[in-house]
Amino acid sequence: MPVLVAPVAYQRLVDPEGEAATARAAAGAGTVMCLSTLATTRPSELATAAPNSRRWFQVYCFEDEGLTLALIQEAIDSGFEAILLTVDAPPGGNRERDRRTGFRIPEGLGVPSVEAALGSERAVTIEETFGLMDRSLGWSDFEELASDCSVPVLVKGVLTGEDAALAVEHGAAGVVVSNHGGRQLDCTLATADALSEVVEAVEGRATVLVDGGIRRGVDVAIALALGADAVLVGRPALWGLAAGGERGVLRVLDLLRDELALTLALCGCRSPKELTRSYVQRAPMAPVYSGQMHASTGF
Ligand SMILES: Cc1cc2nc3c(=O)[nH]c(=O)nc-3n(C[C@H](O)[C@H](O)[C@H](O)COP(=O)(O)O)c2cc1C
């Protein structure tokens, strides 16, 4: 099942069981669930609630290294098999739609793992948590973290071959080609456009995952054909959770699996491994960068 569940924050916003329901659904679909640093369920709690699930932990680096290490340690002690270090946030992007709709995390819905590590007796807000994060992380910091970690560490948020090669050279077990679902840097690359360059730069030395806009089995097939080892889905799993809890997430994952199987069969492939570059070609594309030049401003 080459579709993993991406880390998505605050899942108890959409379902009372939140991350536990997602993890159980991922296990039911035979895949991995990635737990966000900003989860409403802490790693140890998730391990108890979904003991048979395969779990990875997504971490943000905090200015207080002790806090980062405490989160990672809790995850490792709770049977999480890998760490995804997200590097395309902080700071948080300028989410204008959230402002327009007046979206707010309800008071009292905190981040239990961060609260436990800080020894806080009240719920910490998303703004407070982002405020504690390290915005100046460099490759040497990453290397130290990866070498001290007893499980593989992947870098999430890579969009160029150059960064992918640097990640591997500094000890990454893999990279996730991601633009955070388009929620961070405006006008950034589409991950489908960045993927080939990353695959070439990694040269088989590490795992290459990709996310962003995977909605159908055919999207999974295209990503695999472009050289990804697997994909992650963020919003589709969250929509499943909102619509039907654990069963909703499982349904989304089953649909993706069935659609991928159909796509493979129609391509004449017996397994995902048989998908190669030759199965895809670039669609004629509008010039994204220059756009329709405006005569007076030239932009
Ligand atoms: C509501 C929401 C919350 C997210 N929270 C996190 C997070 O806490 N950590 C992280 O690394 N990525 C987070 N992401 C990004 C996802 O992990 C993933 O990169 C992205 O959603 C993939 O695009 P897709 O939603 O089109 O599948 C979030 C995305 C969404 C939509």
Image (spheres, rainbow, N blue to C red):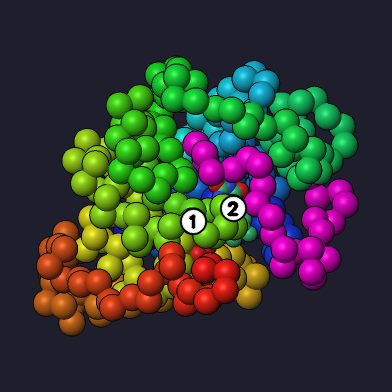
Q: Which residue is mark 2?
A: 184
**What residue type is disc 1 on?**
Thr
283 vs 156, left or right, is: left
Residue range of the region highlighted in magenta in the rendering: 85-110
18 vs 204, left or right, is: right
- Labelled pair 1, 2 in contact (Cβ < 8 Å): yes
**The one of 29 and 48 positioned closer to us in this rendering:** 29
Residue 168: x and y, percent? Answer: 31, 31
Residue 7: x and y, percent? Answer: 54, 50
Relative to 107, is 70 above or below?
A: above
Which quadrant does the N terminus fall into? bottom left
Which residue ends up furthest to the front in the rendered image?
296
Majority secondary structure of magenta residues: loop
Classed neighbour count for the residue bearing mark 2: other residues with Cα under 10 Å, few (<14), some (14–19), many (≥20): some
Does any portion of residue 137 appear in the rendered image? yes
Going 69% across and 55% down the picture, which residue do you hit?
94
Relative to 238, is 139 above or below?
A: above
Going 34% across and 60% down the picture, which residue do you hit?
193
Going 79% across and 63% down the picture, which residue do you hit?
99
**The one of 201 and 115 positioned closer to us in this rendering:** 201
Q: Which residue is mark 1?
A: 188
Going 56% across and 52% down the picture, which residue do you hit?
185
**What residue type is disc 2 on?**
Gln
Disc 2 element: loop
Disc 1 element: loop
